[in-house]
Amino acid sequence: MPAWAKAVSSGVVRPLPTVFGDEIKLRVAHQMVTVDGRRMHGIGINGTVPGPLIRLREGQRARIHVENALDEQTSVHWHGLLLPFQMDGVPGVSFPGIPARSSFTYDFPVIQAGTYWYHSHSGLQEQEGHYGPIVIDPAGSDPVRSDREHVVVLSDRSPLHPHAIFMRLKKQSGYFNRQQQTLAGLLAGEDQPLKDRLMWGGMRMDPTDVADVTGSTYTYLVNGHGPRDNWTALFRPGERVRLRIVNASAMTTFNVRVPGLRLSVVASDGMNVRPVEVDEFQIGVAETYDVIVTPTDERAYTLVGESVDRSGMARMTLAPHEGMAAAVPPLRKRPVASMKDMGMGGHDMGEAGTMQGMDHAAMGHAMPATPAPMDHASMGHTMPASPAPSTPAPVAGGHDMAGMKMRDFGNAPGVRRGPGVQTISPMPVDRTGDPGQGLEDVGHRVLTYRDLMAVEPNPDVRAPVRELEIHLTGNMERYMWSFDGEKLSEVKAPIPFLAGERVRVTLVNDTMMGHPIHLHGHFFELVTGHGAFSPRKHTVIVQPGGKVSWDVTAVEGDWAFHCHMLYHMHAGMMQVVQVRSPQGAPA
């Protein structure tokens, strides 16, 4: 029986430990942690996982002394905070790191307010517990009115060492996927027609491959507590309760809801937005959302953080009294990737294997009578020596799926050819109006990025002076991840920007998995049709087969730019944005 379905304890009513003031001390050290009664090794900060809540105030100067008690290098990155790049905390990019058994002092002005978090940028320490929340109170009165608040840190935890997880993914990318389709299910037409599944098989892809690491090894946590621990937050009926929700997981996209309560979204990535009433929202790794709930009844409610592949959930209780618990909803049916997730522009496959609603002649696509085989050599696949079936000749440079080439570098001329690029989306579309993978037909309102609008006009509303397109690339079978077909170790030069220039960046997802992309040291404005009131974010999910555009004003320094799924970044889905003044190096 999964942990979320078992009998729970009477609940843990224990707020996160908090540190505050102008001088803060953090100690990073090994420790044992207990999750749902199971002890395992971890890395804690000041003796806790997650680390303590750091409470700051806009306008102060923060001096944070970090002692590294580990026997390896560590670091702390202040995710979403705008500060001098030397204080950003990325070893090899903005500073040398904090060597074993030594200390480092971060010193920076606090120039913003909102909900943020901090985490290691060294190795895979983040997965072991090296993370914690940050709340920055505004210098004046808070425009978001609430009677009480709770910080909710979502994360994932495995008894396996993170390097053991990564090794398994490299050897078999679907190692943790226990929800693959069965032959009986395929023959019965469950999830997908058999013809569609055969096409997926022909590309050596699995439409159930929605998450790399799943509930088969992960326990999903709220403030360091598993579902059976039942972390509990108290309220009085009628209060406006602010929940500051942080996704501090290593690999998990969560779908968050509180059955029986509407959620008023009032902030995204620390920035206030015009309130949006929803029933559920998807939160990618490293995103934060502030929501207001107003429970009026003298009863308990369950907050559910369901993993995107629905293999498990984090849960907590909102209750008027300690010891209460509400019903925990069952896991919903796991999503299956669609043609839209393959970059097919949202078109379905017809009975004859053709794309519905598309004028293929006008697009220049020749529709063969049967799907053409893949060019496995170009994809780095070794095929058995069995005779090939009698089919039309393959299109050079990639396989053909019902007339649409799925590895056509003509659609991505800036992408480096190689085995690390398994597919290129032939018709990627803007998916900022989508609720998120698996949430299209849940029967209630789900937040989309297009719902978000800034409260105040953006500080820079100049038109971009240039555009930059970056492709999110990968080979799931080999567990290779990159930008534009180049993993970090292969990149010859950083991405160059000029300080103060306004750039439109379009991210195109050529993979079948959503990626939360984070640019350090900046907020960017999503291009979603709201003009001067576009939402400002530091992290954005680029849905499978989709694209996202944002405008950014470059800030001088060297800044990490990466997918925030830890093992994707570790595999190479990271680059450096180098911003220089026209005169030369940064001060």
Image: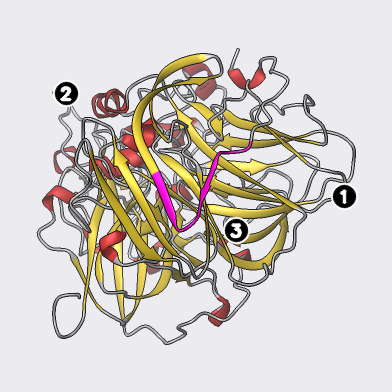
Can you say whether 330 is above or below 392 in the image?
Answer: above
Tell me the kind of residue under disc 1: Gly
Image quadrant containing the C terminus: bottom left
Q: Which mark is residue 119?
A: none
Which callout, 3 or 2, points at the residue further toward the start of the chain? Answer: 2
Residue 410, picture quadrant: bottom left
Q: Residue at position x 35%, y 52% from top?
A: 403
- Disc sitting over residue 384 in the figure: 2
| Depicted 319 relative to depicted 83: above or below | above
Residue found at the far left of this picture = 492
Q: Nearer the viewer, mark 1 or mark 3?
A: 1
Residue range corresponding to the magenta coloring: 15-25
**Quarter placement of the N terminus:** top right
Q: Residue furthest right?
A: 297
Mark number displayed over residue 448: 3
Residue 517 appears in the figure: no
The amino acid type of the residue labelled 3 equals Thr
Circle 3 sits in a helix, a strand or a loop, which is it? loop
Percent of width and height locating residue 324? 80, 26
The answer to if 57 sits in the magenta stretch is no
Secondary element at tag 1: loop
Please provide percent x and percent y for residue 514.
43, 47
* Left or right: where 318 falls relative to 547: right
To which residue does mark 1 refer?
Answer: 238
- Earlier sequence position, callout 2 versus callout 1: 1
